[in-house]
Image (spheres, rainbow, N blue to C red):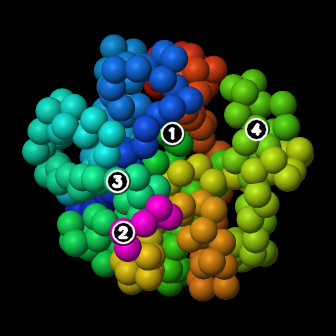
Amino acid sequence: MRIGGVDVERVAAVILAGGLGTRLSSVVADRPKVLASVCGKPFLTYLLNQVAEAGVKHTVLCVGYRGDQIQGAFGESYAGMRLSYSQETALLGTGGALRLALSLIESGMFIAMNGDSYCEVDLRDLCMRHCTRRAKATLVLTFMSKSAKSGIKTTRYGCVTLGADEMITSFEEKGRTEGAGWMNAGIYALDLEMVRDIPQGRLVSLEREVFPSWVGQRLYGYRSRGRFLDIGTPKSYAQADKFFAKRS
C-alpha cells in the first residue's frame, strides 16, 4: 500500500512495552502494563490494531518486565502482521530499549510508539509527512489544556515548542509549565540512522535525553487533534474502558 510515495507495508512498527508499571501496580499487579485489561482485551491489542490498520506488516515488541507473558499472549503473528520480540535483561529505558531492538528493525524509516498510551492519529499520513519533509524524526503531538478532564496535564509531560514550519525548537521539562500546550503523544516516525547514535547497554530516555539532543537535526512535530489516553496511573487507567467504548 503506497500513501504519498510511502510503501507502508515496508515500514516496521516498534512498540515499547518493557516498563515496570510501578505507578499502576496497585490496580495491575500481576502483568505488564500492556496486558492491562481494557474492555475485556489487553491494552496492547488496541496498539497492534492501530498499526495493522495502517498497513504495517512487521511489528517489534520491546519487552522487559514479564515479557514472557506478552509473548505468550500474542505469539508470532497478529492481524496479518509478523511479531518479533526484543527482550531486555536490565532496565534500559525507552531509548535504550529502542537501541537494543535495532537489529530487528527491517526498514530505513519506522514507527515507534509507547506501550502505555494511545493517540488517535493517521499513521499513514504521519509517514507521508515525515518523508515529504525529509525529516529525521517526527513526533506526534497532542494538545492538552491546563484543566484536562482526564487528569493528564502538561505539568506531567512537559510541552513542545514549534517553529512556523513545525520544526521542534525546544522541550519544556515536566513540572516547569502550568499552561496549555502541545505535548509528546508517544508516537514517532524515526529514521533508523538516528537510532544508531543512541548509547548501547545503559538506561536512556527518549523523552529526557534523546529528543532534546536532536533539536536542530530535522526534528519535526506532527499535530494531532485526535483523542489521547495514557494508562500509566490508576486515575488515567480508569478512563480507558470509556475511551475505547466510544470507538466501537
Determine the image quadrant of residue 71: top left
Between residue 47 and residue 16, name the one nearer to us.
16
Q: In front: mark 1 or mark 2? A: 2
**Residue holding disc 2:** 201
Residue 153: assigned label: 4
**How many residues crowd around disc 1 within 10 Å: few (fewer than 14), some, or many (20 or more)?**
many
**Residue holding disc 3:** 90
Q: Position of residue 96 (x, y in %)?
A: 41, 64
Q: Amino acid at mark 2?
A: Gly
**Residue holding disc 1:** 117
Q: Position of residue 181 (x, y in %)?
A: 80, 51
Q: Amino acid at mark 1?
A: Ser
- Which residue shows up at 77% across the image and 45% down it? 154
Q: Is residue 18 above or below residue 46?
A: below
Determine the image quadrant of residue 56: bottom left
Residue 34 is inside the magenta segment:
no
Q: CA distance from mark 3 to mark 2?
A: 9 Å
Q: In front: mark 1 or mark 3? A: 3
Between residue 132 and residue 78, name the one nearer to us.
78
